[in-house]
Amino acid sequence: MILSNKTNIMIVDDSALVRRVLSKELMKCPNFEVIGTAPDPYVARDMIAKKKPDVMLLDIEMPRMDGITFLRKMMQSLPIPTIIVSSLAQQGSTLALEAMRCGAVDVVTKPCEAYSIEEVIPLLIEKIKAAALVDVKKLQKQAATTSAFAKITSFTATTNRILVIGSSTGGTVALEKILPTFPRNCPGTLIVQHIPAGFSKTFADRLNTICDVHVKEAQNGDSVVNGQILIAPGNYHMWLKRDGGRYEVSIGGGEPLHYQRPCVEHLFNSTAEQAGKSAVGIILTGMGSDGAQGLLNMRNAGARTIAQDEASSVVWGMPGSAVKLNAAEFVLPLDKIVPKAMELLR
């Protein structure tokens, strides 16, 4: 965690162009200092030991040693908050999410034809700010912990009940912990996790292999039904809509909100309007305040609301903001959230 006014950044990428562009753009931020760049992990290792950066930006596919192997070694010897800067390719998306299970804090799309540098840099700046606040050892411990998360095997099915979840920094690990505990006939569940396009489908597919319920990346018009979890696609907002006696999701573009697309606010605000007291809202670990006002709107509309507590959050930004607004009816550690949500949904 940072001890000075500036966040010292190390960039590890085999592309000289990427290193140069990222350095140039990040140095425009007065609170950032790029203290070194490296073309591969071997060069980076010596530089890190000497300069001790606050945050590392790490590519995955590099010569001599891949990013995941390097990340594992660094997390054992010198844990550093690490953001994966990866391509949109399927291989890159899969490996990036594996890196997050190994202790990386977040993932950002590498500038490319689909994502211009003007789109990537503002989001990367926010993620670096969040990463600098992360206790990496705490994140590693959460990723390794399994005993506290008991599966819910008995649940009385409900109709027209909705569960919505918002999460950001540390959220992929948190979701991988709690979603496998869901009963097969859980209420229809919608999730906004701050994650780039391309990575969201890989993440949803991964969750589908470890959960009893069906998990998929949401598509416009998908019905919200029991036994299914819909993950908002990266780079698109997601809203809840009611069509007669059924719920469905609407997927669309629009400007980022809180620097995010998808953003939690749109999901929570639409749930307050469309579902009211038939919903339960959960806000998990994450930097910033996205979703806090939306959770308050849900509570004011009669929904039951839960925020993750500070002790179990990797970054207590989003849930902390919700607590300050009195948006959360319950403030609970991660392992207690799903049992309480299912109790409220019965």
Image (cartoon, grey):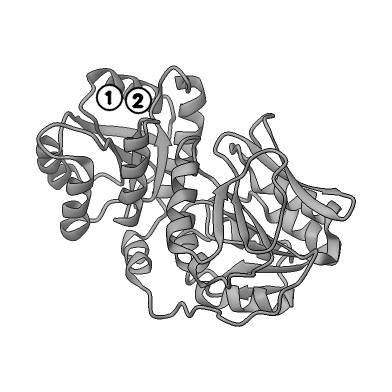
Dot 2 amino acid type: Leu
The residue beneath circle 1 is 19
Q: Who's the residue at 49% across and 37% down the image? A: 196
Viewer-closest of 301 and 55: 301
- Where residue 214 sits, quadrant-wise, is bottom right
303 versus 344 height, above or below: above
Residue 329 horizontal/vertical position (percent): 73, 73
Dot 1 amino acid type: Arg
63 versus 274 height, above or below: above
44 versus 121 height, above or below: below
Quarter containing the N terminus: bottom left
Q: Is there a contact, CB below 8 Å, between mark 2 and mark 1?
A: yes
The residue beneath circle 2 is 22
Viewer-closest of 126 and 213: 213
Is residue 170 visible to us here? no
Residue 70 horizontal/vertical position (percent): 17, 46
Mark 2 secondary-structure assignment: helix
Q: Residues within 10 Å of mark 2 (few under 14, many from 20)?
A: many
